């Protein structure tokens, strides 16, 4: 079995789009996981200075994408504790 190298990709040019698509998919997954770890109101990295992180998003839109609702014009859907 051959390893992945520039020479092997020159011989099998049909594999280049496959590697590009897999690379873009992996980069997108890493970006989204990083965004969830940093921006999600359910995640708190420092419990001492921010014990209730979900309260920061009471008046903000925190959904990544919502094709049907614009949360900036409505009452906030954040839970009230």
Image (cartoon, rainbow, N blue to C red):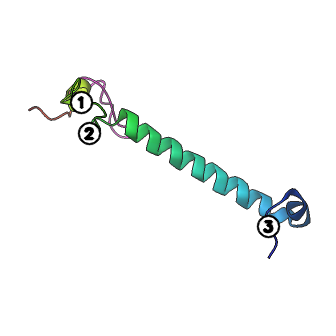
How far apart marks 2 and 1 lie (CA) works out to: 7 Å
Q: Depth check: 4 or 31 in front? A: 4
Q: Quadrant of the N terminus?
A: bottom right
Residue 53 shows which numbered tag?
Answer: 1
Instruction: Give the residue at mark 3.
Output: 3
Q: Position of residue 56 (x, y in %)?
A: 24, 24
Residue drawn at the location 67% of the way across and 55% of the way down: 21
The answer to whether one can see residue 34 in this image is yes
Vertical side of 36 occupied by 58: above or below: above
Task: Kindly report which numbered mark, 2 or 3, lies closer to the viewer in this rendering.
Answer: 3
Marks 3 and 1 in Cβ contact (< 8 Å): no
Is the C-beta separation of discs 2 and 3 under 8 Å? no
Seen as rendered, the residue at the extreme bottom is: 1
Cα–Cα span, label 3 and label 1: 47 Å
Residue drawn at x 32%, y 29% is: 61
- Percent across and percent down for residue 71 are 29, 30
Query: Vertically, is 4 above or below 1?
Result: above
- Start and end of the magenta stretch? 59-74
Label pair 2/1, CB-CB below 8 angstroms:
yes
**62 part of magenta stretch:** yes
The residue carrying mark 2 is: 42
60 inside magenta stretch: yes
Residue 49: image location, x then y, percent: 23, 23
Of callouts 2 and 3, which one flags the residue occurring earlier in the amino acid sequence?
A: 3
Indicate which disc, 2 or 1, sits on the residue closer to the N terminus.
2
Between label 3 and label 1, give the one nearer the viewer. 3
């Amino acid at each position: 079995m051959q390893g992945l190298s520039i020479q092997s990709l020159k011989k099998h040019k049909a594999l280049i789009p496959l590697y590009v698509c897999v690379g873009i998919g992996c980069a997108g997954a890493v970006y989204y996981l990083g965004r969830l770890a940093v921006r999600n109101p359910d995640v708190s990295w420092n419990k001492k200075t921010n014990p209730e992180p979900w309260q920061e998003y009471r008046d903000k839109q925190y959904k990544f994408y919502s094709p049907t609702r614009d949360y900036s014009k409505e009452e906030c859907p954040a839970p009230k504790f």
